[in-house]
Image (tube, rainbow, N blue to C red):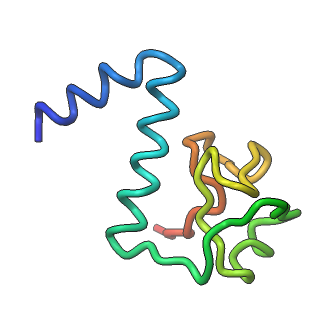
Amino acid sequence: MVGATAGLAFTAITPEGSERVVASLGDFAENLGEVRGRKPQDGDYWRRCADARAAGVAPIYRGQPGYRDGLDADADGIACEPYRGL
């Protein structure tokens, strides 16, 4: 686990590496059961995360259709992530 973490940190140093890490994490999250009603599709545009969630496409990962910075409140590459209250 430590080696994998160090490898991810080293890869994320470049902008291209960071994009690959975010894309990999998106695939990993989907495989762990972060299942959506449908995958984002070309042409998707969501005014609010509530709309994306209602359509069953949330969360949306950077590089996927419908992702935009305005929906990614914490700028981590994942838009409209589930709310996990305290």
| 72 sits to left or right of 24 | right
Residue in the image at 59% along x and 83% along y: 37
Q: Is residue 75 above or below residue 72?
A: above
The picture quadrant where one finds residue 39 is: bottom right
Residue in the image at 64% along x and 55% along y: 79
**Residue 83 image offset from top left, x and y in percent:** 56, 69
Single out the residue that lies furthest toward the top: 14
Q: How many marks?
A: 0
**Residue 48 image offset from top left, x and y in percent:** 82, 65
Q: Nearer the viewer, residue 29 or 50?
A: 29
Q: Is residue 47 above or below residue 62?
A: below
**Residue 53 image offset from top left, x and y in percent:** 69, 76
Single out the residue that lies furthest toward the front: 42
For the N terminus, the image quarter is: top left
| 1 sits to left or right of 5 | left
**Residue 73 image offset from top left, x and y in percent:** 68, 48
Q: Is residue 46 above or below residue 65?
A: below
Residue in the image at 88% along x and 63% along y: 47
The picture quadrant where one finds residue 30 is: bottom left
Q: Is residue 45 above or below residue 9?
A: below
Residue in the image at 76% along x and 57% along y: 66
